[in-house]
């Protein structure tokens, strides 16, 4: 069933943190969900307190090393293969890890931005995370903290004592406040980006959700929009999602197993179901 949906082409992919768990990056709410122990940084807290920024950058500086080492997994490569075969209308990801692109995908809308860039909140200059990493290393030569755990937003859990004395650097041009070019909790996704995503839904034949519980409206709104337009919705995720009531197909199985098999069958024009536990969608 999943391969048949893909084989028809015109599929929009909406991916979430569950797609990257097999690359060693935990999700928020799934089996490895970090929200059970981690409260993500909010935009209001970040801009409102220098101490909060120091805490964030100390944790994120260490977390970036792990994120930078993460490699695309079979799920990312399968999405890229579907794109190469001309079966996708586009890719929207809620992830900030850049693994879709590293896995070979070319046209990706990063709904929440990407960790590879840093923006100055004063002059809006964009610089690379690699450059900031070098500047933070130079400013903190004795920083040798070890992470307790990494989180999907790129920071890590650290003891408070490890954060004391960490030095934050400002914008290289104006000495303004630097922030990763991602949408923090409590921050608004740029309206133009949202419009582009809605337009992608409207030109799609089907919507495929990969690794997202759809708990927050940021991604779920596109499922609701597809359902309103009678566009079929398929969801591949480990565990239930808040979009299941609107799905014509749900697959509860690891993405790294299901998606490559479905992509191979789709590329061959087959409508045989991919491996994995398929369950009827609620209310269908």
Image (spheres, grey):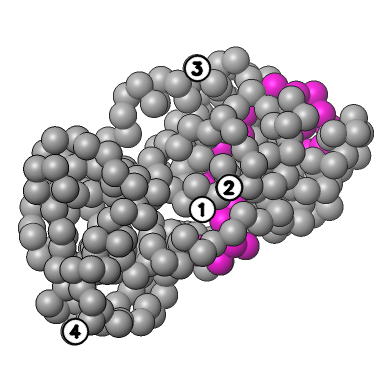
Mark sitting on residue 67 = none
Q: How far apart are marks 3 and 1 (CA)?
A: 23 Å
Q: Is residue 116 magenta?
A: no
- Left or right: where 279 falls relative to 109: right
Is the C-beta separation of discs 1 and 4 under 8 Å? Answer: no
Front label number (3 vs 4): 4
- Secondary element type, mark 2: helix
Measured in 3D between alpha carbons, the distance from the residue under mark 2 to the one under mark 3, in whole angstroms, is: 25 Å
Q: Is residue 52 left or right of residue 135?
A: left
Mark 2 lies on residue: 102
Circle 4 residue: 161
Task: Evaluate whether residue 205 shows in this view.
Answer: yes
**Residue stretch in magenta:** 2-26
Q: Is residue 105 above or below residue 96?
A: above
Location of residue 84 by image quarter: top right
First in sequence, mark 1 or 4: give its number: 1
Of residue 175 and residue 21, the one placed in the foreground of this image is: 175
Q: Distance between the residues labelled 2 and 1?
A: 16 Å
Q: Looking at the image, is mark 3 or mark 4 earlier in the sequence?
A: 4
> In the drawing, what numbered circle is on residue 17?
1
The residue indicated by pointer 3 is 199
* Image-based side of 72 in relation to 108, left or right: right
């Amino acid at each position: 069933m999943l391969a048949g949906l893909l084989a028809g082409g015109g599929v929009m992919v909406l991916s979430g943190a569950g797609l990257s768990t097999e690359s060693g990056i935990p999700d928020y709410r799934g089996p490895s969900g970090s929200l059970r122990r981690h409260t993500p940084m909010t935009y209001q807290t970040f801009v409102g307190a220098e101490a909060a920024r120091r805490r964030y950058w100390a944790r994120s500086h260490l977390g970036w090393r792990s994120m930078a080492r993460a490699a695309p997994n079979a799920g990312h490569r399968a999405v890229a293969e579907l794109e190469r075969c001309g079966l996708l209308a586009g890719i929207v990801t809620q992830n900030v890890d850049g693994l879709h692109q590293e896995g070979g995908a070319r046209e990706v809308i990063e709904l929440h931005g990407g960790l590879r860039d840093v923006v100055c909140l004063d002059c809006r200059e964009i610089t690379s995370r690699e450059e900031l990493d070098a500047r933070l290393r130079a400013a903190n030569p004795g920083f040798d903290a070890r992470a307790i755990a990494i989180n999907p937003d790129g920071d890590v859990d650290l003891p408070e004592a490890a954060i004391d004395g960490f030095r934050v650097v400002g914008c290289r041009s104006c000495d303004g406040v630097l922030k990763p070019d991602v949408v923090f909790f409590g921050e608004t996704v740029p309206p133009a980006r949202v419009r582009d995503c809605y337009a992608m839904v409207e030109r799609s034949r089907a919507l495929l959700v990969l690794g997202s519980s759809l708990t927050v409206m940021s991604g779920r709104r596109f499922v609701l929009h597809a359902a309103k337009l009678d566009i079929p919705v398929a969801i591949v995720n480990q565990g239930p999602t808040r979009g299941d009531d609107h799905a014509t197909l749900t697959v509860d199985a690891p993405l790294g197993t299901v998606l490559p098999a479905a992509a191979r069958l789709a590329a061959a024009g087959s409508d045989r179901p991919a491996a994995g536990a398929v369950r009827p969608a609620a209310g269908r």
